[in-house]
Image (tube, rainbow, N blue to C red):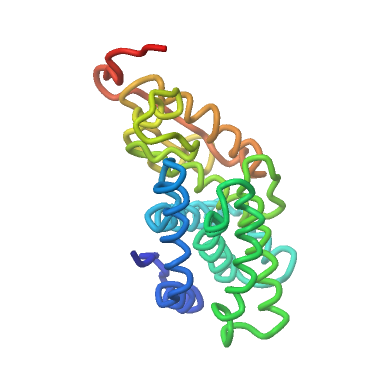
Amino acid sequence: MPLNIPVKQNKKLETVVQRINENITISTYWYCSNITAIDRMGINDHGPVHIRIVANLALKILRMLIEANVQPSVEKHHKLTRDDAEVIVVLAAALHDIGHIVHRANHEPFSVALAANLLSELLVGLYEPRERAIITAEVLHAIYAHDTHVEPLTVEAGALKIADALDMEEGRARIPFKAGSLTIHAVSATAIEDVQIRKGDKRPICIEIKMSNSAGIFQIDNLLKEKLKRSGLAEYFEIRAEITGEEKKLIERYEL
């Protein structure tokens, strides 16, 4: 399943997305990550569908922040461009979960190690050696910092962290849960019907979440709120969650 990214006029990003889509190792790592997550551990998706959703969300968040006059860290600290910030965010999104091929536990540092070996071929010819090293450093930081408990030090890493938590529609919660289980994780995941990002009324970005049941608050409170709080970007976001229509019954009976 290829990435489908709105590259606009960013030629470097266009080339990077094409290289990602043509890279057999990366697509196989996505596949193997889902073998670990779904087939072997019985938890939710961490493969190509998740990657495609997160890459688009992270890029959209970055662009909205830039429209709100938030300067990307690679521009502020390294004097590179906003186009380069987009390359960083999409690369980090594409590679942030490949560590699942090793194990779910500690997948973030595993992803960093695996990504380091892939970035040189994805960036070759697009950047001079110094700039290539900077892009690599920023991507690896963003990958590592998508862990809920790690504080991102860049705008790009913060955008990825928030985007990762937003892939929660239709049972796609980022809090792993066993398929078919009746835990609060599983029940709350099924309550999330729609997630949209739009321009905010009081802050630059509004995250709108529609739920079929109030159990969805668990997903928002236990993951999204925590990741947003630790993203370094919380001041730019507002969150609105509401139940659409009559509250839906999610389970008939629960026994211990």
- Residue 210 is at least partly visible in this image: no
Q: Note whether 141 is above or below 226 in the view shown.
A: below
Quadrant where the C terminus is found in the figure: top left
Q: Residue at point 50% right, 54% down?
A: 58
The answer to whether 112 appears left or right of 83 in the picture is right
Relative depth, front residue between 212 and 59: 212
The answer to whether 217 appears left or right of 248 in the picture is right
Expressed as whole percent of the image width and height from the top left, the position of residue 72 reads 63, 60
Expressed as whole percent of the image width and height from the top left, the position of residue 52 reads 40, 58
Tally of numbered discs? 0
- Residue 115 is at least partly visible in this image: yes
Quadrant in the rendering for residue 7: bottom left
Q: Residue at point 57% right, 48% down?
A: 161
Quadrant in the rendering for residue 255: top left
Relative depth, front residue between 108 and 213: 108
Q: Residue at point 51% right, 78% down?
A: 12
Quadrant where the N terminus is found in the figure: bottom left
Expressed as whole percent of the image width and height from the top left, the position of residue 232 reads 67, 44
Relative depth, front residue between 212 and 31: 31
Q: Residue at point 74% right, 64% down?
A: 77
Expressed as whole percent of the image width and height from the top left, the position of residue 59 reads 48, 58
